[in-house]
């Protein structure tokens, strides 16, 4: 029938593939006499250790046990038609054992779960080998036609080869360098496809194998021609599959690449949302190309950088576990030393050096993260791990091992919307095991939980050969686990002012000479003053750069600049320099000072960071009696010059030049300045005033969208849950915490939104409809957050005994203007409902009323306050009634606030038709 040459190649070639793919460093752990019983015993020991083993590992061991028990009788069945060679069995189970052992460590629990789920699913597709073997053993005579047995064994060997290929592919995912060996040594030459595609093909082959095998053994006596037909049909299928794998259409490579990148992007989003990666992209201001040359040439840094990445080390778990401390370098320096700029110089240096073949065969990549007090929203340890994994996935998105890992993660098992910390750590550890990498972390002392982060980093380093460099201040507390007995670990490079002296001089001297040549210091200047500048810097690059910005400011005269150089020693320290800079800012016009002070407040105490358009709107907000200045300049892009460099503007994004600037403005040292942020009462009061002014003077006093009449929805035919509490799809999209208490919107039933078919075409549900707040970038923030800022100002003022009434009541003029403008109030109510957060002012009435006792009613401020309290109480009652009686319909149709049409003199809400009619009357 068939040539016996078909028998041995797939068994022997599969064993040869295992021997070739297993790395030398894993040969010591490879059990050459492995069998199914041995694996089952080891998995059983894992299952019974419930108290000491992760329960996820126990669950995985049970799934693996099912797979092994289902597959083990395959060899019993195979033995009925051919004499088994011992190496076929031992190398087969040894390969599976190696895969399991590589994942059983806690570093890969997530991937172990995915592999166990996959093998469990395959187990349900496999033939019932045990039943078939028992049937064959009962019916097979002592002697038979050996050609038939050989041919049967040949067909059975395809399944053996498929499983070996699967085991090796899984093994390669968890090792460095083995993928290339498998690619070159595999028995089948084919164009590469992702793991999920290969698994799908294998499941199809298994299903076909099962159908054939069941037909082969279904009866004691069968027609010979039928058996031959089934065998030929199965063999034709296998050969056709091999041809397809070997000649996949290359024309579809582009489409496949796009699909693969989509998979990678999905996992990246699962690991890390885009806002967390923003901490990575901020580039520091350049000082000088050679400012960090001294550091990059230091022996400690070069020793850390030049350690070679060796595949044998990367795949040796014992070595990684016992020597990880030597791969971590701590760089510590005082505040303002220039550590952030230094970290970026390190990244550039590493990028240039990674092409050196002496370091590694595969060029290492560089991943980077920066903790910053100025962006505390992303200072959690988890944020750094997510951002690092996000970068590495992007860098390795074309690598086969990484793509296979992605395919495992995307299997149809439990896949949360966002990964938890352990899952992120598992993925990150695997990526670092697969590929060599440097990791640079700046500002680690500004992480909101340094101890936790360093603990997670230690776990990461124990499982990979990544080189990590950490920049921090000298007061960083390093955990004891970073110490290693009888060694110099932890490796700490402490930088002093003397290290930076030459770099500061080489940076500042050309700048000062340029300023002198351009006449910034007057007609003549003693150039011998210039060296004193670098000496006074005391190793602080930040101090030197900030003073240079002050010297270039148009706010000071040439004589004053020269005087600053003459007395530069008096400016030593960032505190003295910042005090001089804000004194200079006081020379601005009233309008410019207002813009600068407002920018300081928004950046330091905003509920969240405003985007450039919203910040521009906030800084441009003015009361009706103020002169416009925004039409002559772009306020946002002018902030850096206006603030003498205390603020930085990069691609329209505004931030403090350094966290120390904000810290100084919030300290008592600045309390006498009009730019001070020391008094939080005044800060929140001014922010509330800015929001209210925006609502009064910038938001049009008219409906925000098209008016839609009230069309009561038709109730469902059978409504069994009409009284159930329900929220709209967008009810949680505001991103802000409501100030409401027990009368909040969560405690009211909200009927489902049912659009009237007649008006559906005019409703804003088309993708072409322009959002109502497109040209009002600050509307969401102003509408939802002014009560929060006012509440904080009132709460703080009730506990303060030192604040002046000017600071305490900074919001009063804007609040009064808002409360006396029914049109502005109505627009605000409509906006609040459109943002799915019904307005409530219940918590503001009491604290505001308490202030009346501190201000005499005979003063203008006292009278204004009492009027505001009265109007606030009326508005609060109206909002409570609106929420109580009309919340359901207002959520569906916020424009109804302009169509209330209340009877008599008790009417509060303006009717837009009446407003338009009265405006048209001459």
Image (tube, rainbow, N blue to C red):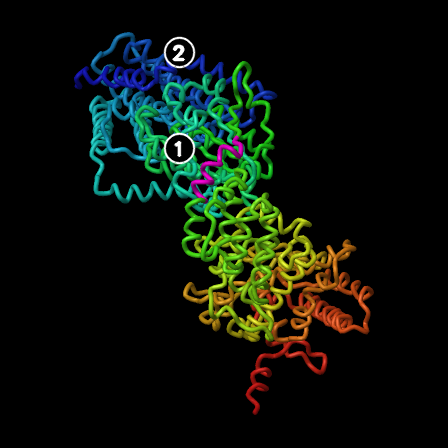
Query: Mark 2 packing: few (<14 Cα in 10 Å), some, or many (20+)?
Result: few
Q: Quadrant of residue 795?
A: bottom right
Residue 559: x %, y % from top left = 53, 57
> Residue under circle 1?
405
> Residue under circle 2?
28
Q: Secondary structure at mark 2?
A: loop
Q: Which residues are magenta?
A: 495-508
498 within the magenta span: yes
Horizontally, residue 907 falls left or right of residue 49, namely right
**Image position of 101 with respect to 706: above or below:** above
Among the two numbered marks 1 and 2 on one chain, the one whose residue lies closer to the N terminus: 2
Whether residue 716 is visible to the viewer of this picture, yes or no, is no
Give whichever of 439, 122 is nearer the camera: 439
Whether residue 407 is visible to the viewer of this picture, yes or no, is yes
Q: Secondary structure at mark 1?
A: helix
Give whichever of 896, 497 is nearer the camera: 497
Q: Which residue appears farthest toward the bottom when viewing the image?
A: 922
Taking the spot 45% from the left edge, 15% from the top edge, the residue there is 39
Q: Quadrant of residue 793?
A: bottom right
179 within the magenta span: no
Give whichever of 587, 257 is nearer the camera: 587
Image quadrant in which the C terminus is located: bottom right
């Amino acid at each position: 029938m068939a040539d016996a040459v078909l028998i041995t190649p797939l068994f022997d070639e599969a064993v040869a593939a295992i021997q070739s793919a297993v790395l030398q460093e894993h040969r010591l752990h490879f059990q050459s006499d492995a069998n199914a019983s041995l694996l089952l015993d080891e998995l059983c020991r894992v299952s019974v250790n419930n108290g000491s083993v992760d329960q996820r590992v126990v669950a995985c061991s049970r799934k693996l046990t099912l797979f092994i028990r289902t597959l083990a009788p395959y060899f019993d069945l195979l033995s009925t038609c051919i004499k088994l060679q011992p190496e076929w069995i031992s190398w087969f189970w040894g390969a599976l054992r190696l895969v399991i052992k590589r994942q059983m460590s806690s570093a890969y629990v997530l991937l172990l779960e995915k592999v166990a789920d996959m093998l469990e699913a395959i187990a349900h597709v496999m033939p019932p080998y045990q039943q078939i073997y028992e049937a064959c053993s009962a019916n097979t005579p002592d002697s038979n036609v050996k050609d038939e047995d050989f041919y049967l064994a040949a067909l059975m060997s395809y399944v053996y080869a498929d499983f070996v290929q699967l085991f090796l592919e899984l093994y390669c995912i968890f090792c460095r360098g083995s993928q290339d060996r498998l690619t070159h040594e595999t028995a089948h030459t084919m164009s590469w496809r992702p793991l999920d595609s290969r698994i799908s093909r294998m499941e199809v082959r298994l299903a076909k194998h099962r159908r054939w095998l069941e037909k082969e053994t279904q009866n004691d006596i069968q027609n010979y021609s039928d058996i031959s037909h089934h065998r030929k049909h199965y063999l034709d299928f296998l050969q056709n599959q091999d041809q397809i794998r070997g000649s996949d259409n290359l024309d579809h490579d582009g489409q496949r690449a796009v699909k693969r990148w989509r998979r990678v992007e999905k996992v990246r989003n699962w690991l890390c949302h885009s806002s967390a990666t923003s901490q990575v992209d901020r580039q520091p201001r350049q000082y000088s190309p050679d400012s960090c040359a001294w550091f990059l040439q230091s022996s400690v840094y070069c020793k850390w950088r030049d350690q070679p990445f060796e595949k044998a080390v990367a795949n040796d778990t014992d070595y990684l576990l016992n020597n990880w401390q030597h791969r971590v370098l701590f760089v510590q320096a005082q505040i303002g030393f220039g550590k952030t700029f230094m970290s970026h110089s390190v990244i550039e240096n590493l990028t240039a050096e990674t092409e050196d073949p002496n370091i590694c065969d595969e060029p290492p990549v560089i991943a980077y993260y920066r903790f910053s007090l100025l962006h505390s929203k992303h200072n959690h340890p988890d944020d750094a791990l997510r951002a690092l994994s996000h970068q590495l996935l992007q860098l390795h998105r074309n690598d086969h091992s990484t793509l296979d890992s992605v395919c495992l993660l995307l299997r149809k098992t439990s896949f949360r919307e966002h990964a938890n910390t352990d899952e992120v750590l598992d993925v990150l550890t695997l990526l670092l095991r697969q590929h060599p990498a440097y990791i640079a972390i700046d500002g680690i002392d500004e992480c909101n939980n340094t101890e936790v982060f360093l603990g997670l980093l230690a776990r990461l380093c124990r499982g990979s050969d990544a080189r990590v460099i950490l920049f921090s201040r000298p007061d960083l507390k390093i955990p004891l686990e970073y110490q290693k007995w009888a060694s110099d670990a932890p490796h700490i490079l402490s930088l002093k002012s003397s290290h930076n002296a030459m770099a500061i001089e080489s940076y500042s001297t050309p700048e000062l000479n340029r300023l002198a040549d351009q006449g910034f210091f007057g007609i003549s200047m003693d150039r011998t003053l210039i060296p004193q500048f670098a000496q006074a810097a005391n190793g602080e690059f930040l101090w030197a750069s900030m003073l240079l910005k002050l010297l270039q400011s148009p706010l000071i005269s040439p004589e004053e600049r020269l005087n600053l150089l003459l007395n530069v020693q008096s400016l030593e320290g960032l505190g003295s320099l910042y005090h001089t800079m804000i004194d200079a800012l006081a020379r601005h016009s009233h309008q410019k000072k207002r813009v600068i002070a407002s920018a300081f407040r928004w950046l330091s105490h905003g509920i969240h960071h405003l985007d450039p358009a919203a910040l521009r709107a906030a800084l441009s907000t003015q009361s009706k009696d103020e002169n416009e200045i925004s039409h002559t300049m772009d306020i946002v892009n002018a902030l850096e010059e206006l603030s003498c460099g205390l603020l930085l503007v990069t691609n329209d994004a505004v931030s403090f030049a350094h966290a120390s600037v904000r810290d100084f403005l919030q300290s008592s040292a600045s309390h006498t300045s009009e730019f001070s942020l020391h008094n939080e009462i005044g800060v929140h009061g001014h922010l509330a005033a800015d929001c209210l002014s925006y609502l009064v003077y910038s938001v049009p006093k008219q409906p925000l969208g098209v008016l839609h009449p009230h069309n009561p929805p038709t109730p469902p035919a059978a409504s069994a849950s009409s009284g159930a509490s329900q929220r709209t799809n967008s009810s949680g999209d505001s991103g802000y915490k409501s100030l409401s208490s027990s009368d909040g919107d969560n405690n009211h039933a909200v009927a489902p939104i049912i659009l009237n078919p007649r008006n559906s075409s005019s409703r804003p549900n088309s993708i072409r409809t322009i959002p109502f707040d497109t040209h009002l970038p600050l509307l969401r923030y102003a509408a939802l957050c002014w009560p929060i800022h006012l509440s904080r100002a009132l709460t703080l003022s009730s506990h303060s005994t030192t604040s002046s009434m000017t600071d305490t009541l900074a919001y009063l003029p804007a609040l009064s203007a808002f409360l006396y403008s029914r049109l502005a109030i109505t627009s605000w109510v409509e906006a609040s409902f459109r943002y799915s957060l019904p307005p409530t002012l219940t918590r503001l009435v009491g604290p505001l009323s308490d202030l009346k006792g501190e201000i005499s009613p005979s003063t203008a401020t006292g009278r204004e306050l009492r009027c505001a309290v009265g109007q606030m109480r009326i508005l609060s009652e109206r909002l409570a009634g609106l929420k109580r009686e009309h919340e359901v319909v207002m959520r569906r149709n916020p424009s109804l606030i302009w169509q209330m049409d209340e009877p008599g003199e008790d009417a509060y809400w303006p009717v837009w038709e009446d407003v338009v009619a009265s405006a048209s009357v001459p």
